[in-house]
């Protein structure tokens, strides 16, 4: 019986056949990734995900029948059972939708023009349970949309509440997360080990009742721990 780890099961969802073919070609060339299916719209993605049980869904936003935001909410929202990780791949000209996608349950996002190695790394990152935010667009997207929240969200929680819940070191780590830094980069900045950073991140999520790194970033911007301006 082999002890080799199971490959990461990936479902590719994009309404452009050429884009899907490109993703499948890139991902299938990796020994630890298995593309289990394709979908041309959000409705098909939801049906395929429930049938194929992928670990990760690579999700476009603008699609017919059901867009990527609604599909993400159905697959990975608060009411979803055994949700897959959803990696949203977007472009700057649709960035108005990214914040809603993250709120819907996405584990992160990348730009469509990201190099193949970055896309592959994105699959592996979210499959490990780590949320992924493209550093080049974190401040632009999250910062901008956190400043234009719906009124119902503005009462939860205050900056003082977050500061009271976390230690000074944890606050510092949260700010670094919000800037789009990886665990390794935070470790280098704070002169600690990546394992220590991972422990801090786990504590931050637990103390603030957050699901993942994406929610932590949104919260940091929302309460004003970091500025959304470039």
Image (cartoon, grey):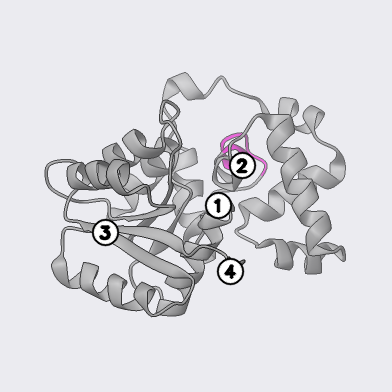
- The alpha-carbon separation of the residues under discs 3 and 2 comes to 31 Å
Q: Nearer the viewer, residue 145 or 56?
A: 56
Which of disc 4 and disc 2 is earlier in sequence? 4
Residue under numbered circle 1: 131
Membership of 222 in magenta stretch: yes
Report x, y in % for residue 66.
Answer: 18, 41
Q: Are marks 1 and 2 in contact (CB under 8 Å)?
A: yes
Q: Which residues are magenta?
A: 219-225
Which of disc 2 and disc 1 is earlier in sequence? 1
| Image quarter in which the N terminus is found | bottom right
Q: Nearer the viewer, residue 20 or 217?
A: 20
Residue 129 visible in the shown view: yes
Disc 3: CA contacts within 10 A as few (<14), some (14-19) or many (>=20):
some
Residue at 37% in and 43% down: 101
Residue under numbered circle 2: 216
Residue under numbered circle 4: 4
Label 1 or label 2, whichever lies nearer to me, is 1
Which of disc 4 and disc 3 is earlier in sequence? 4
Which of disc 3 and disc 1 is earlier in sequence? 3
Quadrant of the rendered image containing residue 65? top left
Left or right of 19? Residue 103 is right
Left or right of 67? Residue 217 is right
């Amino acid at each position: 019986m082999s002890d080799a780890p199971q490959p990461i099961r990936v479902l590719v969802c994009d309404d452009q056949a050429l884009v899907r073919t490109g993703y499948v070609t890139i991902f299938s060339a990796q020994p630890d990734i298995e593309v289990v299916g394709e979908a041309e719209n959000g409705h098909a993605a939801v049906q395929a995900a429930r049938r194929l049980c992928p670990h990760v869904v690579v999700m476009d936003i603008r699609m017919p029948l059901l867009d990527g935001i609604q599909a993400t909410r159905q697959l990975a929202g608060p009411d979803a059972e055994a949700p897959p990780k959803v990696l949203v791949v977007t472009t700057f000209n649709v960035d108005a939708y990214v914040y809603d996608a993250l709120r819907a349950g996405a584990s992160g996002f990348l730009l469509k023009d990201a190099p193949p190695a970055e896309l592959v790394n994105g699959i592996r990152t979210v499959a490990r349970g780590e949320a992924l935010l493209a550093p080049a667009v974190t401040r632009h997207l999250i910062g901008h949309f956190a400043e234009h929240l719906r009124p119902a969200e503005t009462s939860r929680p205050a900056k003082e509440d977050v500061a009271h819940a976390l230690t000074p070191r944890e606050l510092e780590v949260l700010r670094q997360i919000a800037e789009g830094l990886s665990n390794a980069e935070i470790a280098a900045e704070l002169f600690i080990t990546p394992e220590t950073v991972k422990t801090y991140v786990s504590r931050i999520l637990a103390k603030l009742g957050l699901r993942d790194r994406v929610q932590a970033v949104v919260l940091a911007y929302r309460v004003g721990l970091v500025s959304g301006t470039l």
